[in-house]
């Protein structure tokens, strides 16, 4: 009986160690999109679900609950002569004007379940919003 318990205890210990190693191995750093010009050592990403979203003619405000359990706010402002899409990506690729329908059900109304990666460079440039619509 004692030998049996030692074997069972050994298997449980091995299982816990293997699970912990797998969890740590699955955590990866995001690869920035090739369109970003900021060097990796000056770039930070915030990935998570969007808690608040407001869009007007020249401003977008976001509050994001990150996957790291922090809440971050971002505001993007642009000139009337510029298009917001300049600072947008869709799943890491160029954002096109027709992509609005993938993230909004109506102008200024975000589709539930849309996620986001916000790329921020420490050089003072505007953040880049990488929209991640809910997969159907």
Image: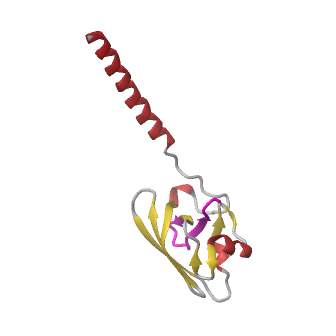
Farthest residue, direction front:
1
- Tell me the quarter of the image containing the C terminus: bottom right
Occupied quadrant, residue 106? bottom right
Span of residues in magenta: 119-136
Judge whether residue 127 is colored magenta.
yes
- The percent position of residue 135, horizontal first and vertical second, equals 63, 59
- The percent position of residue 58, horizontal first and vertical second, equals 59, 86
Q: How was this image coloured? A: secondary structure
How many numbered discs sit on the rendered protein? 0
Residue at point 58% right, 69% down? 129
Residue at point 60% right, 88% down? 57
The one nearer the camera, 71 or 39, is: 71
Image height of 69 relative to 83, above or below:
above
Residue 4 as seen in the image, left or right of residue 77: left
- The percent position of residue 36, horizontal first and vertical second, equals 63, 63
- Tell me the quarter of the image containing the N terminus: top left
Occupied quadrant, residue 111? bottom right
Farthest residue, direction left:
2
Residue at point 55% right, 69% down? 112
Residue at point 57% right, 66% down? 114
The one nearer the camera, 125 or 62, is: 62
Residue 101 as seen in the image, left or right of residue 46: right
- The percent position of residue 134, horizontal first and vertical second, equals 60, 62
Judge whether residue 92 is colored magenta.
no
């Amino acid at each position: 009986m004692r030998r049996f318990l030692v074997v069972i205890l050994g298997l449980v210990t091995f299982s816990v160690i293997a699970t912990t190693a797998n969890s740590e191995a699955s955590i990866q750093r995001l690869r920035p999109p090739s369109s970003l010009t900021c060097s990796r050592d000056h770039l930070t990403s915030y990935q998570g679900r969007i808690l608040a979203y407001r869009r007007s003619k020249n401003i977008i405000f976001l509050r994001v609950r990150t996957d790291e359990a922090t809440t971050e706010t971002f505001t993007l402002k642009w000139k009337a002569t510029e298009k917001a899409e300049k600072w947008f990506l869709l799943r890491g690729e160029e954002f096109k004007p027709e992509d609005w329908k993938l993230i909004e059900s109506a102008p200024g109304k975000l589709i539930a379940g849309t996620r986001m990666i916000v790329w921020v460079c420490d050089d003072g440039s505007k953040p880049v919003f990488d929209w991640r619509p809910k997969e159907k």
